[in-house]
Image: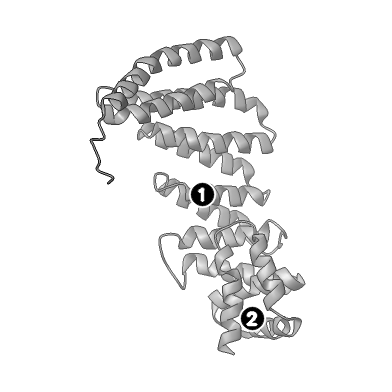
Amino acid sequence: DAAFVFKCMHALSPSILPVECVDCIKEYVLNNISSEEYSALESIVTQTTNTYFRAVCGELVWQNNHSSSVGAAALNAYHTELSSPSYSDEYSFIRIALSICRIYAKVKFPNFDFHGFSQSCFDYVIKNADSGYLILNLLEGIFSCSVDQNQVIATLEQIIDILAQKPDFAKAASFSETLADFYRKAKCKDQIPALRVKIAELYEQEADTLDSKDSRNVHQILRYIQLAMNAWAKVEDKQESKKRRQLLAKKAKPLKDLRFHSLKSTSSGEYDIT
């Protein structure tokens, strides 16, 4: 009935974005859906023409009984939803794409065109390079499928270049941290030392873009200087690391003094507490 269907849909709705279903979802499913309901739901899923229902509830059934036919049906339904979502918003592409990754990361269904799917995701993230941090979730989802990992890395490198040219040095540095993680997992550790230097320099560049004469920027400048110092601490060349951190500390000192005097001179006024 309608209440049962709603319960099934609700069981997965909070997990549409994550690559992995969180424990609370699994606990909800175990405590609220019986084996009889699963059987009834599987029957509905295999017959329905509603792609959104077949995708979401098909995944729910597949997680329970690991039926390859149901899993493939859910995967293909999500793929259909990707190009023509039943419920469209600014996050629908990423949400649906991660649902595909969530299934494919566990089972490589042979008839699914993952390369075509991943290429559409790469095109999406390049087009939306400066839209926010959720595109990192999408790249992480594709990377977790252990397919097209080199292309994931190449795409993220391109995005970082786009952000640095914008310029948005802080975001480029933040994205580079994820790139370092990809290098490590893809056994490209030889790429990490140079990237560590780049991350530190990007944070320094972000600090330099802010006008230190404007007191409103002091806190942010000090924050980026500290991030740069932390990044330099991870650089393999310890002599260069120490030298750059000393220069940054020298650069930060007058700003810290300025912030201290600014706080000291700020009066809170008098309050009558009687």
The residue at 69%/79% (across/down) is 33
Q: Is residue 19 visible?
A: yes
- Looking at marks 2 and 1 on the same chain, the residue that comes earlier in the sequence is marked by 2
The residue at 44%/15% (across/down) is 249
Q: Nearer the viewer, residue 262 or 76?
A: 262
Viewed as shown, does residue 128 lie left or right of 111?
left
Q: Residue 78: which quarter of the image?
A: bottom right
Q: Position of residue 137 (x, y in %)?
A: 54, 50
Q: Which mark is residue 122?
A: 1
* Whether label 2 touches label 1, CB < 8 Å: no
Circle 1 residues within 10 Å: few <14, some 14–19, many ≥20: many
Q: Position of residue 223 (x, y in %)?
A: 42, 29
Quote the CA–CA distance across marks 2 and 1: 30 Å
Q: Residue 190: which quarter of the image?
A: top right
At mark 2, the secondary structure is helix
Quarter occupied by the N terminus: bottom right
Q: Identify residue type, mark 2.
A: Val
Viewed as shown, does residue 167 lie left or right of 3?
left
* Image position of 203 with respect to 84: above or below: above
The residue labelled by disc 2 is 45
